[in-house]
Amino acid sequence: MWHSLSVSVALICIASVVQGLDLKSANDQPCFKIPNPKTPILDMKWVNSINPLYFPAMSTDNLYRASLNVLQKEARDVSFATVYYDACLKWYIFDNGTTVATGFNGLRTEYKTKPLKDNPDAFTFVGVGVDKDFYSGTLYTTLTDNKSFFFGAICMKNGEMAWGVGSTTPTLTEETKKIVFDHAVSLGFNKEDFTELKYDTCRN
């Protein structure tokens, strides 16, 4: 499976040299209901202690939208190779409900977050840029070890579902990678749309 994932990424990079990002084809599935947990699974004290927070694996749609929001560019003007090799996305979480995303060699953008009242493992996030709805929605934590990673299933404002893995490190171990990818598949996500970010070429 992991070999086929690498091949898929390579093919997408080659194709995107001559065209921009295709947001429509990156859509995976419509939003579905995430049941409220009987007890919280996410330790927020641990999450708030992570600085920075890396996102080494995510759905393609999530990567596209998060990257374009930092770049403040149109999808047609950005290639997959650019977001795959240059995104270097990092997130900084603050107690006042502000989350700052950085990437692409020093660019940054902000989000306002608010926890859901009926689900302690979920929160809404809204961008503060020109198009607030482009990358906004509700993130539900559905899997975590409260030590190194958490898996977030995201219902985007446009009605599409995406996912991402928050991590204390820029790369995931093979064991963790298998756990999160298997979990994504169990939620109905298409493995052909799984993406891993490259942090080894980041300049900051």
Image: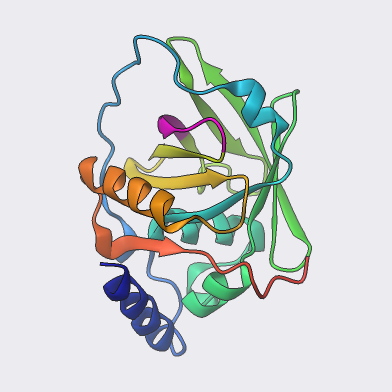
Residue under the image location 48 percent in, 58 percent down: 63
The spot of residue 50 in percent (x, y) is: 69, 37
Q: Nearer the viewer, residue 79 or 95?
A: 95
Q: Nearer the viewer, residue 20 or 173?
A: 173
Q: Nearer the viewer, residue 54 or 12?
A: 54
State whether the magenta stretch is mostly helix, strand or loop: strand
Please, is residue 25 above or below residue 48 in the view? below
Q: Quadrant of the C terminus?
A: bottom right
Q: Quadrant of the N terminus?
A: bottom left
The spot of residue 146 in percent (x, y) is: 53, 30
The spot of residue 97 in percent (x, y) is: 69, 26
Span shown in magenta: 138-147
Q: Quadrant of residue 44?
A: top right
| Residue 92 among magenta residues | no
* Image coloring type: rainbow
Tell me if 13 is positioned left or right of 184 in this view: right
The answer, for residue 110, to whether it is visible in the render is yes
Please, is residue 75 above or below residue 97 in the view? below
